[in-house]
Image (spheres, rainbow, N blue to C red):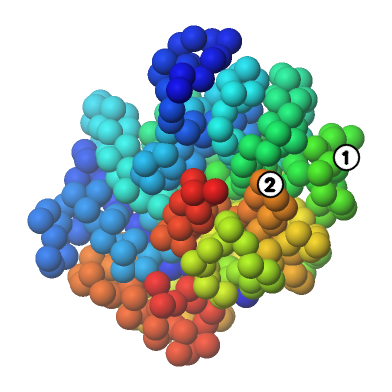
Amino acid sequence: MLARQANGAIASEYQGVTVIAIVDYKAGNLASVKKAFDHLGANTKVTDDSQIVSKADKIVLPGVGHFAATRALGDSGLREAILERIEHGVPFLGICVGMQWMLASSEEAPGVNGLGLWPGECSRFPSGVKSPHVGWNSLTIKNGSRLLTGVADGEFVYFTHSYRVPLLSSTVAACDYAGEFSAAVEQGNVFAVQFHPEKSGSAGLRILDNFCSV
Amino acid sequence: MLTKRIIACLDVDAGRVVKGTQFVNLRDAGDPTELAAAHSASGADEIVLLDITATHQKRATLIETVKRTARELFVPFTVGGGVRTLEDASGIFDAGADKISINSAAIADPSLITCIAQRFGSQAVIVAIDAKRNGIGFTAFTAGGRQNSRNDAVEWAKEAEGRGAGEILLTSMDRDGTGAGFDCELTKAVSEAVRIPVIASGGAGSADDFVQVFREGAADAALAASIFHFRVSSISELKRQLLTAGVPMRYPC
């Protein structure tokens, strides 16, 4: 069945095929994220256009760098498009800053509002440890999840971040670096990871593949 | 807990890996794509590609090499060598690198660090420092180790951090190529002076050298090139030995 779209070009190009929109809001490089999904055979569309995001079957919000960069999501209509899609039940995956944005705020950028889906604030690592937290650290599985199906407790994944999300009721995996923080969160159709699955070898590809399957 | 990283480095000249000629079971031991894939499969936590080409065709060849190498790599991939501007960095990120490493250009104009970090994130910017002992401390050198910058290496590392560098890649010029072990005193001096992670480089010869640089040198990661070009299984075996010696490692890998 041909999906009726406002933009006819999109309908004819992606007829019957699941399209994953990778949101580009100029928060760092997302080539690796696209590459990983393409490698898994997914159909991806890197876009900064809220209209395209509004019609996506799945959404990925990457993010490397500063929480303040998420301001761009508010300026462009992307925030509304993403929120609407999430409320509509569309699978959404936030990566790194993309995960942090699910909270209301971050100590990194006072005054910049996150989406506020989850309670709390992103906080910096305490003094006494190197920051950013860079490298391979292990996941402590807290609860079963669709996102982490087939991922073993203790599996190593790659992190690089200076701020972290506290443990939430919807946390499915934690990581320990100067205390436990949320490594992966899953709540209904909203999924988020602090680490970079596109840089976490086969374990990371497994996680992205699980997202392709939900 | 956070593990220490073992990073494999490929020195590339005009699209071919130099010194990587003793690898067995590879169709082409000089091909960066094949070597990077082999090291990753063997357990390398990250791959660094350093371009040492001196010709005019440098940029185009490097971009092609980065694209091909990045295609099948799903671990962090850093590219360095001749990155002079934001535009250079941008092209390399577009080609598939996750991080870039800058050395001489950063010393010449430290604002370049901030410029790239603001656009791509501090996590994507590594400042590489080539350091040599000078009797009382350590001096940073530029231009492939040929020019004395007159900057104290530790002070320069602190400034680079302040400007937005995400990590420091510290090479001991005294130890590089000797196989006599890393310069742990240099590494510790820099590692204790900055909050950002420090990658030790220069002098790796044995598993014990790695144990020393993580313990005495307080390094967060260690990088080596020729030591890994001998056997496909060497990184995996190295990590097993380090884990046995009590160093946190991503192993099995």
Residue A99, above or below B29:
above
Image location of residue A173, percent across then percent down: 66, 66
Numbered circle sitting on residue B193 = none
Residue ID at (47%, 89%): B245
Label 2 is placed on what type of residue?
Val
Category of crowding for the residue at label 1, using alpha-carbon neighbours closer than 10 angstroms: few (below 14), some (14–19), many (at least 20)? few
Residue A111, above or below B245:
above
Residue B137, above or below B98:
below
Q: Quadrant of the N terminus of chain B?
A: bottom right
Instruction: Report the label total.
Output: 2
Judge by depth and name the residue closer to the eye, A147 or B233: A147
Q: Which residue is mark 2?
A: A190
Q: Which residue is mark 1?
A: A110
Residue ID at (22%, 53%): B34
State left or right for residue A72 relative to residue A21. Answer: right
Which secondary structure, mark 1? loop
Image location of residue B149, percent across then percent down: 51, 45
Subunit of label 2? A
Subunit of label 1? A
Q: Name which quarter of the figure residue A75 lies in.
A: top right
Judge by depth and name the residue closer to the eye, A38 or B95: A38
Q: Quadrant of the C terminus of chain B?
A: bottom left
Q: Name which quarter of the figure residue A58 lies in.
A: top right
Residue ID at (55%, 24%): A47
